[in-house]
Amino acid sequence: MKRFLKSVGFALNGWRAFFTHEKNGRIQIVIGITTIIAGFIFHLSAPEWIAILFCLALIPTLEMLNSALEKLCDLAEPSINEKIKFIKDVAAGAVLWSTVFVIIIGAIIFVPKILDCIK
Ligand SMILES: Nc1ncnc2c1ncn2[C@@H]1O[C@H](COP(=O)(O)OP(=O)(O)OP(=O)(O)O)[C@@H](O)[C@H]1O
């Protein structure tokens, strides 16, 4: 139990490092809070909340892995290297790939509600 709590502590340190020191982490916080507020304003249904919460979990998770990989690459090979370029580009590509679908999901959920409000 003590070891488990220690591991949770390390993971929470990871959250703090990502969400306070990384620019992308701070952006994710702003997007997350804004989306949750919008969810309450537009009275999302349970399935809509599930989709939105899944999206809000997915992108920061990928961003965290991307940031960790970037740091590892910078440590392992500070000079220009084709393999490092591949690793960094593919990791960034993973974030972008998911982001495209998350934007589509967000649009499917929020755009009709916003249009209803404007009418
Ligand atoms: N050591 C390297 N060798 C080859 N290409 C690199 C190297 N470091 C970075 N690059 C290239 O530059 C791009 C940007 O790398 P960088 O580490 O600056 O990521 P970033 O997303 O701009 O970082 P940040 O998240 O700090 O803004 C990489 O995707 C890669 O194409």
Image (cartoon, helix red, strand yellow):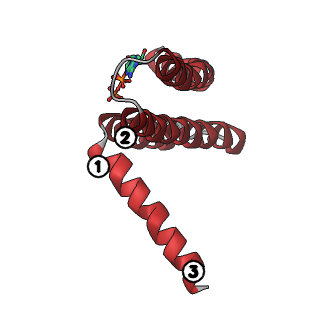
Left or right: 19 as drawn, with respect to 113: left
Question: Cα distance, mark 3 to mark 1?
Answer: 26 Å
**Image coordinates for residue 95, horizontal then vertical, percent:** 54, 26
Q: Identify the mark nearer the N-term, 2 or 1.
A: 1
Q: Residue at x 66, y 41 (%)?
A: 45
Q: Closer to the N terminus: mark 3 or mark 1? A: 3
Quarter of image, ligand 1: top left
Residue 34 or 67: which is nearer the viewer? 67
Eye-nearest disc, 3 or 1: 3
The residue under label 1 is 20
Picture disc at residue 25: 2
Where residue 15 appears, as percent x and y from the top left, is: 42, 55
Labelled pair 2, 3 in contact (Cβ < 8 Å): no
Please identify the residue farthest to the bottom as the structure is shown: 2
Mark 2 and mark 1: span between their CA atoms? Answer: 7 Å
Residue under label 3, please give it: 3
Q: Residue at x 33, y 29 (%)?
A: 78
Is 66 in front, or is 47?
66
Residue 84 placed where, x, y %? 48, 23
Task: Determine the image quadrant of residue 24.
Answer: top left
Give residue 44's quadrant in the image.
top right
Kindly report which numbered mark, 2 or 3, lies closer to the viewer in this rendering.
3
Type of amino acid at the residue the image marks with label 2:
Gly
Amino acid type of the residue that numbered disc 3 sits on in the rendered structure: Arg
In the displayed structure, would residue 100 be above or below residue 42? above
Q: Are marks 3 and 1 in contact (CB under 8 Å)?
A: no
Residue at mark 2 to residue at mark 3: CA–CA distance: 27 Å
